[in-house]
Image (cartoon, helix red, strand yellow):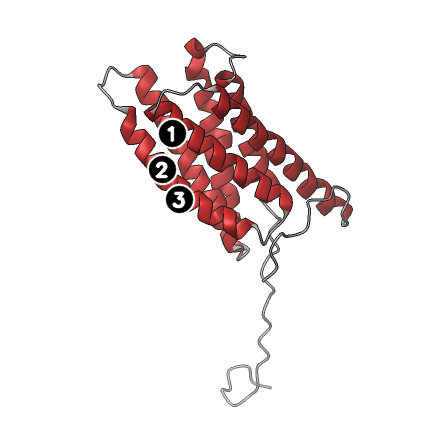
Amino acid sequence: MDENDPLEPHTIIKKPPPKIADPACLGLIGLAIAALVLAFTDLGFASSKMESLMIPWTLFLGGTAQLVAGIMDFKRDNIFGATAFTTYSMLWYSVSLTLFITIFTSIDFDLTHYAHGLLGFLIFSLLLTAASLMTNKILLGVLLSIDIAILALVSHILVGTGTVPVGISLLFVSIFSFYGAAGELINNMADKEVLPLGEPVWKP
């Protein structure tokens, strides 16, 4: 058999695409820790004079961990996880840069612009919350808590309400995210549901 003969049949063996692990645990644990750091500051358990020390946590765990998770979910063809993690990572990068500007520069700034950006993001976050009705109750809890936290932060900037509502909302973000991360990790490793994440609220 002549391998160079174009008339000879050739068997083309397609290799299956490499299996990519579920990155949800990575994204959720990054969100949980970053939200916890901000929550403790907003609730008064940490000095606001040391706000600069929040930046590494918001930048690497809040931003970068979720960005990596989002890119991995794009490769897994998970449109919800990919969209959620990458957009929320951009939000955390924005928060980190805002903290840097307000702490380390002498630039005159108006946080009203920051609030307007948060309002725009809140619209998207509400759409994502609606989509999460088709996932599980823990993710729904995470997203609802994020929505409330953003709304409370906008109110703090524009109206002057206290930071306690922001801190409480972020604390719930952290709790739901820690539980969701634990569920994703343990359930995947056990190959069965050990920690229930809750059935979808909406099954179209």
Residue at x 32% of width, y 19% of height? 102
Label 2 crowd (10 A; few <14 / some 14-19 / many >=20): some
Q: x, y percentage for residue 56?
A: 46, 23
The quarter in which the C terminus is drawn is: bottom right
Q: Is residue 107 left or right of residue 179?
A: left
Residue at x 43% of width, y 18% of height? 162
Q: Which residue is mark 1?
A: 154
Quarter where residue 139 is shown: top right
Q: Which residue is mark 2?
A: 119
Q: Is residue 140 left or right of residue 112?
A: right
- The reply to whether dot 3 and dot 2 touch (C-beta < 8 Å) is yes
Q: CA distance from mark 1 to mark 2?
A: 7 Å
Residue at x 27% of width, y 17% of height? 105
Query: Which of the two discs, 3 and 1, labels the residue nearer the N terminus?
Result: 3
User: In the image, which disc is placed on residue 114?
Assistant: none
* Mark 2 residue type: Leu
Point out the residue furthest to the bottom here: 7
Q: x, y percentage for residue 103?
A: 34, 16
Element at badge 3?
Answer: helix
Q: Which residue is mark 3?
A: 123
Label 3 crowd (10 A; few <14 / some 14-19 / many >=20): few
Q: Is residue 173 left or right of residue 119?
A: right
Label 1 crowd (10 A; few <14 / some 14-19 / many >=20): many
* Mark 3 residue type: Ile
